[in-house]
Image (cartoon, rainbow, N blue to C red):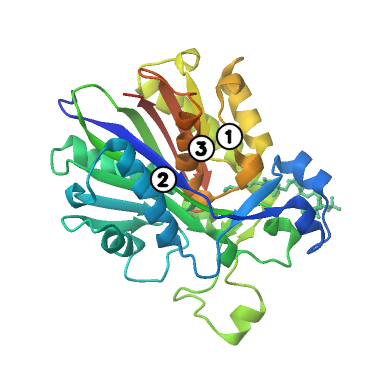
């Protein structure tokens, strides 16, 4: 189908909490080492939100920065899509809380729960609304406070995650913005990466709290293997649907879970793709749905993205769920 209205990113911003938790700090908390964390993941430090700083607060800060870059008044925002697996509360949605805080009085909004793939899911959903003409000014936010769903006694997971938020403004454009996207889920392997308790299957109880069942549980090695294969396939399909080849991608912004995953995916895509990857996981760790918009925001601020560049985004996470997208920068 030939599109007449395209959805383009016109502003991007991010927010990172002030508190830094280094690998040296973690050495004092669990049986781990800076050397193990750096060589197995690439992470050196991560940000941790304050006790009174919620996912919605971080989302608002990132959204304000993106709106400022797009020169868009919050009152003109029509839709707010928030990708998060750590909402402030079960309901109302984080999108509602962000709408109120921004004063986006004409906007509707909802949350998208798709763990680390959430931002690409939200971007695709927002783009469909903009391309159809139903929404003109959309905010797409990825925001997470993973520190509250981290088991700080488990070295298998506590070294991996961090908090933060990123946001983009999506608006109609005569030129292609989102050139392609591809989304997928496979619920058959839901339990290799999940938070078991807190829903109706295992409601909160003293027992679920004692057993750390409100925290992220992950079969790391299994997730790693599936992540590499799935991200490679999603990236290749997104590139093909954009009518491009891997060597025509100018910048790759992957979900930032593990340096070794990104390196393996990039090498499979082509000989020089790793040189085009923007990474900041050394400073933030894995921030789930926030990782891609935070990285995009930093890449743009660092002058790594220029007009006409084709940006490949690709993510994989709990669900299992995944997404790939190619965006042409305005
Ligand atoms: O964002 C959503 C998607 N998530 C991901 O994509 C994450 C995918 N998985 C990974 O990134 C990696 O599997 C991890 C970083 C989680 C783990 O790395 P790994 O190379 O797969 O290590 P492993 O789980 O195979 O563990 C190797 C060893 C084990 O010891 P033994 O059994 O060989 O004696 C672990 O107990 O490393 C041990 N280990 C640690 N040692 C020091 C596990 N965590 C730690 C730690 N510090 N923090």
Placement of 176 over or under 43, stated as above or below: above
Tell me, for residue 125, which label it has, or none: none
x 57%, y 67%: residue = 148
The residue carrying pointer 1 sits among few (fewer than 14), some (14 to 19) or many (20 or more) residues within 10 Å by Cα, namely: some
Q: Is residue 205 left or right of residue 128?
A: right
Q: Residue furthest bottom?
A: 206
Measure the C-alpha gap from mark 3 to mark 1.
22 Å
Name which residue lies at 64% across and 43% down: 283
Residue at which label 3 appears: 295
The percent position of residue 218, horizontal first and vertical second, equals: 64, 57
**Which sits in the foreground, 297 or 119?**
297
**Disc 3 + disc 1, Cβ < 8 Å:** no
Cα distance between the residues tagged 2 and 1:
20 Å
Dividing the picture into quadrants, the one containing residue 132 is top left
Does any atom of ligand 1 lie closer than 8 Å to the CB of label 2?
no
The answer to whether residue 304 is visible is yes
Pick the quarter of the image with the C terminus. Answer: top left
Q: Which residue is mark 2?
A: 119
First along the sequence among labels 2 and 1: 2
Dot 3 crowding, Cα within 10 Å, few <14, some 14–19, many 20+: many
- Say which element carries label 3: helix
**Residue drawn 80% across and 62% down?**
30
Q: Quadrant of the N terminus?
A: top left
Residue 161 at what x, y percent from top left?
Answer: 62, 54
What residue is disc 1 on?
A: 229
Label 2 packing within 10 angstroms: few (<14), some (14-19), many (20+): many
């Amino acid at each position: 189908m030939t599109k007449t209205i395209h959805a383009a990113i016109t502003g991007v911003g991010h927010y990172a909490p002030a508190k830094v938790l280094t690998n040296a700090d973690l050495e004092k908390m669990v049986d781990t080492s800076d050397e193990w964390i750096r060589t197995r993941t690439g992470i050196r430090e991560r940000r941790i939100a304050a006790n009174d700083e919620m996912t919605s607060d971080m989302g608002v800060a990132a959204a304000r920065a993106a709106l400022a870059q797009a020169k868009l008044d919050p009152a003109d925002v029509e839709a707010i899509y928030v990708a998060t697996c750590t909402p402030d509360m079960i309901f109302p949605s984080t999108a509602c809380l962000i709408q109120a805080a921004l004063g986006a009085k004409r906007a509707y909004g909802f949350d998208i729960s798709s763990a680390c793939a959430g931002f690409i899911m939200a971007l695709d959903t927002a783009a469909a609304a903009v391309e159809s003409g139903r929404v003109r000014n959309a905010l797409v936010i990825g925001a997470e406070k993973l520190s509250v769903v981290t088991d700080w006694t488990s070295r298998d997971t506590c070294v991996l995650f961090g908090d933060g938020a990123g946001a983009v403004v999506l608006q109609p454009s005569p030129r292609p913005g989102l050139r392609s996207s591809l989304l997928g889920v496979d619920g058959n392997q839901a339990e290799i990466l999940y938070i078991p308790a807190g829903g109706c299957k295992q409601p909160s109880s003293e027992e679920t709290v004692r057993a750390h069942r409100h925290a992220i549980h992950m079969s790391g090695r299994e997730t790693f293997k599936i992540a590499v294969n799935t991200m490679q396939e999603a990236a290749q399909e997104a590139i093909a649907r954009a009518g491009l080849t891997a060597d025509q991608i100018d910048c790759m912004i992957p979900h930032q879970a593990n340096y070794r995953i990104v390196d393996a995916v990039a090498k499979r895509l082509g000989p020089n793709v790793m040189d085009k990857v923007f990474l900041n996981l050394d400073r933030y760790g894995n921030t789930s749905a926030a990782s891609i918009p935070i990285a995009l925001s930093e890449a743009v601020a660092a002058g790594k993205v220029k007009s006409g560049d084709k940006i490949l985004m690709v993510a994989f996470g709990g669900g299992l769920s995944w997404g790939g997208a190619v965006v042409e920068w305005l």
